[in-house]
Image (cartoon, rainbow, N blue to C red):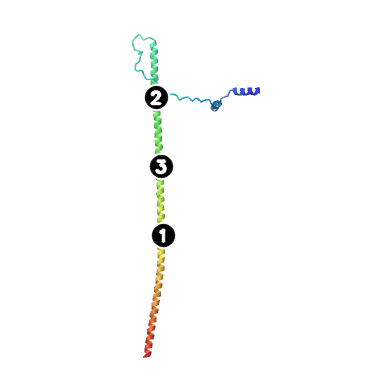
């Protein structure tokens, strides 16, 4: 039992060799998950550096008059270093603002160009859809006109055939009437001849 405890303690105390970034990340995660109740401290982002404004009244001004001690040079050097740092900070800040402005300008140009491309494609797509609708309506109207013309032609053909049938019936009726009239005339003529013959015989 004691041997198992010592072996576990030896394994825990055994140093871990970090060969790459994956091992380092795994080691950090294992250390973090050993105590999940412990709050994680997230560092704050770095604050922007602000230098104090230049003083309105500068004391200990060194001039060209005689009698300046050896300690005045160190004061002058300190003030000069502060002024150089302030000017360098102002220059870096202006360059950063310039880069930020160029970056935002580039983003705005890209966004505007993307909107123009999408608007152009949208207009092209809507035009294509509108032309397709117009073409579909035109095809429908043409189909309707063709169907109506075909129905008119068929109705005309039916009317013509009905007219021909009626003409045939009319001609047949006329022929029958002509035949009937000729028979009637023939019968009346025979009757008159018979009457004449009877009268001549009586005489």
Identify the residue at horizontal 39%, vertical 81% (top origin): 187
Please rate how many residues cluster around mark 3, counting C-alpha atoms within 10 Å: few if below 14, some from 14 to 19, many from 20: few
Q: CA distance from mark 3 to mark 1?
A: 43 Å
Tag nearer the camera, 3 or 1: 1
Identify the residue at horizontal 41%, vertical 48% (top origin): 133
Check disc 2 and report the residue beneath it.
93
Image coordinates of residue 31 in percent, x first then y, are 55, 25
Front residue of 9 and 57: 9
Task: Return the disc, 3 or 1, that comes first in the chain's sequence.
Answer: 3
Q: Which picture quadrant has residue 9?
A: top right
**Which mark is drawn over residue 75?**
none
Which element carries disc 3, helix, strand or loop? helix
Q: Residue furthest top?
A: 67
Check disc 1 and report the residue beneath it.
151
Front residue of 22 and 29: 29
Image coordinates of residue 51 in percent, x first then y, are 39, 20
Task: Return the disc, 2 or 1, that comes first in the chain's sequence.
Answer: 2
31 lies above or below 115 = above
Which element carries disc 1, helix, strand or loop? helix
Check disc 3 and report the residue beneath it.
122
């Amino acid at each position: 039992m004691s041997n198992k405890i010592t072996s576990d303690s030896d394994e825990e105390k055994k140093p871990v060799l970090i060969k790459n970034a994956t091992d380092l990340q795994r080691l950090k995660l294992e250390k973090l998950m050993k105590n999940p109740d412990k709050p994680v401290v997230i560092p704050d982002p770095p604050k922007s550096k602000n230098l104090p404004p230049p003083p309105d009244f500068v004391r200990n001004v060194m001039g060209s008059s005689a009698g300046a001690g050896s300690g005045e040079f160190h004061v002058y050097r300190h003030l000069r270093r502060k002024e150089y740092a302030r000017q360098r900070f102002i220059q870096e800040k202006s360059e950063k603002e310039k880069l930020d402005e160029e970056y935002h300008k580039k983003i705005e140009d890209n966004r505007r160009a993307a909107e123009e491309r999408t608007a152009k494609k949208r207009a092209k797509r809507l035009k294509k859809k509108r032309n397709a609708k117009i073409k579909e309506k035109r095809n429908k109207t043409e189909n309707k006109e063709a169907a109506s013309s075909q129905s008119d032609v068929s109705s005309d053909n039916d009317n013509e055939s009905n007219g021909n049938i009626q003409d045939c019936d009319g001609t047949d009726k006329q022929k029958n009437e002509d035949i009937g009239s000729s028979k009637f005339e023939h019968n009346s003529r025979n009757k008159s001849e018979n009457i004449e013959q009877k009268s001549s015989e009586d005489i």
